[in-house]
Image (cartoon, rainbow, N blue to C red):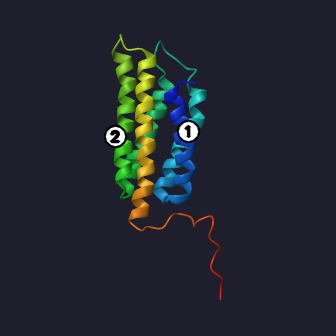
Amino acid sequence: MPPVQLFFLCSALAILPLAWVKGGHPERAGVALFIAAYVAAPFLEGFRIGETMPAIAVEDLIILSVLIWLALKHDRWWLLLASAAQSLNVLSHVALMVTPELTAREAIGAQWVFGLVSLYALFSGILERRLSGERAASPALSRTPAPQT
């Protein structure tokens, strides 16, 4: 496994559960979106036309649409950063289609980098929510509920 892929995997395994537990509703939506994309990707990678993977390109376009919708719905700056990174990810698919000297390996490397930016934008969203004093979407796992009187 290449070091970049290993770093991506370790980052995802650390950030996604943390974002689910410590994040608000937009962060949870981001976690669900990223997990759905990670689960669907192996099934979509097999369909190729030359160097391009159109099913992955459509998946990335759907992710971009959902991130933009979340950015318009919620007041979170990390969604703007994740949407920008995802738009560059979609553009890497376009570049692969229109530039004959570009290889799939180079495009996938760029997509990993843009995916890491989106993932760490989600992580910074957790920090932003915590610094602003906003409550998490779920109570902390270690706290016991207050007794009812």
Asked if residue 102 lies left or right of residue 10, the reply is left
Residue ID at (56%, 31%)? 41
Asked if residue 81 lies left or right of residue 8, the reply is left
Asked if residue 84 lies left or right of residue 22, the reply is left
Task: Say which quadrant the C terminus sits in.
Answer: bottom right
Image location (x, y in percent) of residue 145? 64, 75
Task: Say which mark, if any, is on residue 10.
Answer: 1
Task: Say which quadrant the N terminus sits in.
Answer: top right
- Where disc 1 sits, the SS reads helix
When the figure is inspected, residue 105 is found, relative to residue 16, above or below; the finding is above
Identify residue type, mark 2.
Answer: Ala
Residue at the far front in the pictured view? 3
Identify residue type, mark 1.
Answer: Cys
Asked if residue 149 lies left or right of residue 44, the reply is right
User: Looking at the image, which is closer to me, 147 or 28?
Assistant: 147
Image location (x, y in percent) of residue 121? 40, 46
Residue ID at (39%, 37%)? 86
- Where disc 2 sits, the SS reads helix
Question: What residue is disc 2 on?
Answer: 84
Image location (x, y in percent) of residue 28? 52, 54
How far, Cα to Cα, is label 1 from label 2?
A: 23 Å
